[in-house]
Amino acid sequence: MILWYGGKQSGSDSSKSDGIFLKTDASESLPLLVDKWREKIQLIYLDPPFFTGKKFSFRQKIGKEGWQGSSKHIISHQAYADVWDSRESFLDMLQEVLTLSHQLLKPEGSMFLHLDYRFSAHARLMMDKIFGESNFLNEIVWAYQTGGRTKRYFSRKHDTILFYRKSDEHYFNADEVGKPRGTLKRNNMKKQIGEDGRVFWSIRSNGKEYRYYEDSKVYPSDVWDDISHLHQKDPERTGYDTQKPEALMERILLSASRPGDWIGDFFAGSGTTPAVAQKNGRKWIAMDMSKFSIHVCRKRLLQSSEAKFFCFSDPKLKAQKYEDNNDVEIKITKSNEKTMEVQLLSYQCEPLSEFDYKFFDYIDYWSIGYIRDNEFFSYQETYRSAENPYLKNVLVVGVDKADAEKELACHIIDIYGKQLLLIL
Ligand SMILES: C[S@@+](CC[C@H](N)C(=O)[O-])C[C@H]1O[C@@H](n2cnc3c(N)ncnc32)[C@H](O)[C@@H]1O
């Protein structure tokens, strides 16, 4: 499945989109993209599996109760398995993705590779070969406090983010991520006011005066201990395991890219990179193998105030004629000359035995749009979220959208991640 984001008439013309999401194995799709995207991407952030041997979940909230916070109304799906036949198979995958990513970067571009103690040393050697040792810039330590503590050795409380540039033309703007120095009192320093009226604190060392202006910025070092992991109840949480905080992505994105640049993330997970890119006026190309990733990412982008238009094509999701389907009942009424109402009357899927759910509780998202050249253009959508746990059962669509070349269609995604595309 490919999802295009933004640019109303974009479709397969990716140059007109603000975002592109491919539900795919990155090591299989990157070789196909490399010619078209060579040296087009400013920043690539990769947060691959860490070789943990674990399976990770997506916790799907069910119906109004689930989205209002009841932990009973949740169904857990496997989002992805970080389970490998051997260390070699993991390293082969990494090598393939890193090599191709390097080719996609612009000469002024950068790559951030997020790993932990298990493989960061291997990855460093690999990256040195691919990027050249002289292009290594930082081993960023992201230190956090979450989780338990062991008594058998020092608890492992940091991830490693390797920062490489493509070449010495690389773009980096520390000002974008600096924090105001502020008015805090500094021991051993003297507060003064300069001739220009600016307040500074000064200290003398070896006969030299060092001045720290209150209105200047402090730039982050390579130890990031001021960004915490997402807590259980963090409003940012999407239910997708291993989700990273937006603040982490923001620091990377703001320092190493400019508005309008393309940002790549080929292990997108819950869509943190696309979400932060959208908020900061960057374009993005994302990939993930998990069917839940694309769905979580789509809803996450729709929820933001800058939300734009979506279009997708999926050779595996065959559009079905409404008359031939047995699972969905829809009623269409013309409300006036220009609009019609599409009402969802019933939906059938495998029932859950725990609660007496109604058909509507099984639906997480549905949309009305049209199909043109095998692409579905969403015209209006409704979905559940923490801010709005209710789904609309009627969507209104402009009649002119349903003309001869454009087939009016309905797209449904249920709580199992199953999708239906019906030509109405
Ligand atoms: C650590 S998670 C990424 C989390 C993400 N940074 C976030 O903030 O939500 C790793 C992701 O890589 C995906 N993945 C694993 N192997 C992949 C592959 N070969 N191609 C594409 N995606 C893959 C998994 O489905 C998972 O969503």
Image (cartoon, rainbow, N blue to C red):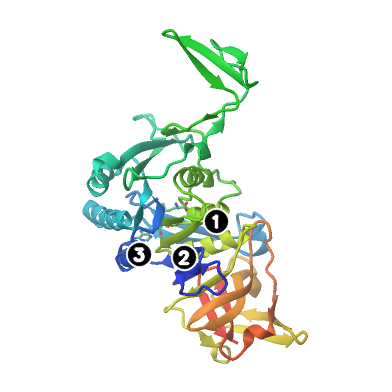
The numbered dot on residue 20 is: 2
Say whether residue 77 is left or right of residue 379: left
Q: Quadrant of residue 394?
A: bottom right
Q: Which residue is mark 1?
A: 278
Does 383 sit above or below residue 70?
A: below
Q: Is mark 3 within 8 Å of ligand 1?
A: yes
| Amino acid residing under circle 3 | Asp
The numbered dot on residue 312 is: none
For discs 1 and 3, the disc positioned in front in the rendered view: 1
Quadrant showing the C terminus: bottom right
Q: CA distance from mark 1 to mark 2?
A: 12 Å
The numbered dot on residue 25 is: 3
Q: Nearer the viewer, residue 260 or 60?
A: 260
**Percent of width and height locating residue 309:** 58, 68
Q: CA distance from mark 3 to mark 2?
A: 15 Å
Does 392 sit above or below residue 145?
A: below
